[in-house]
Image (tube, rainbow, N blue to C red):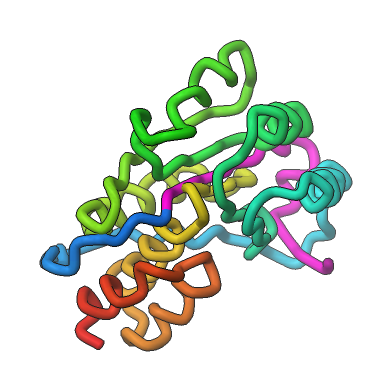
Amino acid sequence: MKMVLCSALLATLSPLLLVGCSSNPADANEAPSDQMTTASPTVDDSPMPQALETLIQLADGQDIRNLAHHEPMLWTAGQLTAEQLSALATAGMSVFISLRPADENGAGWEETQLEGSSAQFVRIPVQGKMGVTFENAQKLADVLAQHRNEPVTVYCGSSNRVGALFALSAYKADGLPADQALAIGIEHGLSSLEPVVRGLLNL
C-alpha cells in the first residue's frame, strides 16, 4: 500500500489510534447541530516511516473483524480482542477509540488492559441507534482532530456505529453532499444503521 504522511513523524511517530462501535440501530430524530469541526489529517509527499509500515503489516495480520485502513493513520474496525489490542499497542498504535458503552456485552475491559501502556484509550458511548447523533459525531471529530498526526483506530462491535458517525461528520463537519457523506459512512463500516443515517441526512 502506497501512502504518505508528514515528514516530521519520521523521528517522532507516536502510537496509533483505534476507534470502535457496535451494530445496534440508531435514533433518526436527532437534529443536526450548527457547527462541527473537521478531523481530516494533514499529509504531504514524505515517504512513509518504516514504523508505520510495520504497524500496517501487523494490523493486517491480526485477523481483526471488519478492519479497514483508510488513510496513513486511520483504521476502523469491529471489536478487538485483548490479544489484538495489546499487539497493536505494543507495535505503536497511539490511540484507540471505542464507541461501545462500557456496560455493553464484550466491552469495558480495554481501560484496564492498557494500563501502563503509552497508548491512549478514549470511549465515546454510542448507545445503539439512539446514540447515532450529530452530537456524538462531533465528539468523535474533536478527538480525531486532537490526534490528527497520530495513527488512530476507531472501533465498535462491527464498525457499524463507526461508519454512522463518519457519515454524519462528513456531512456536517466537512460539508459534503448527503449522498457522498453516506458513501463515506459505508466505506467506514456503516451497515444496518444506514436507514437511521439516511433519515438524519434527509435522504
Residue 171, given in percent of the width and then of the height, sits at 32, 75
Which residue is painted at 65% across and 40% down in the image? 16
Q: Quadrant of the N terminus?
A: bottom right
Query: Height in image: 28 above or below 150?
Result: below
- The residue nearer to you, when weighing 3 against 114, is 114
Residue 150 appears anywhere in the view: yes
Asked which quadrant contains residue 104, the reply is top left
Q: Is residue 200 left or right of residue 167?
A: left
Which residue is painted at 39% across and 78% down in the image? 181
Query: Height in image: 185 above or below 157?
Result: below
Q: Is residue 68 left or right of residue 95?
A: right
Which residue is painted at 56% across and 36% down in the image? 95
* Range shown magenta: 1-22
Query: What type of secondary structure mainly makes up the magenta span?
Result: loop
Residue 195, given in percent of the width and then of the height, sits at 30, 77
Residue 62, given in percent of the width and then of the height, sits at 78, 45
Residue 174, given in percent of the width and then of the height, sits at 36, 72
In the orientation shown, which residue stands out farthest toward the front? 105
- The residue nearer to you, when weighing 57 against 50, is 57
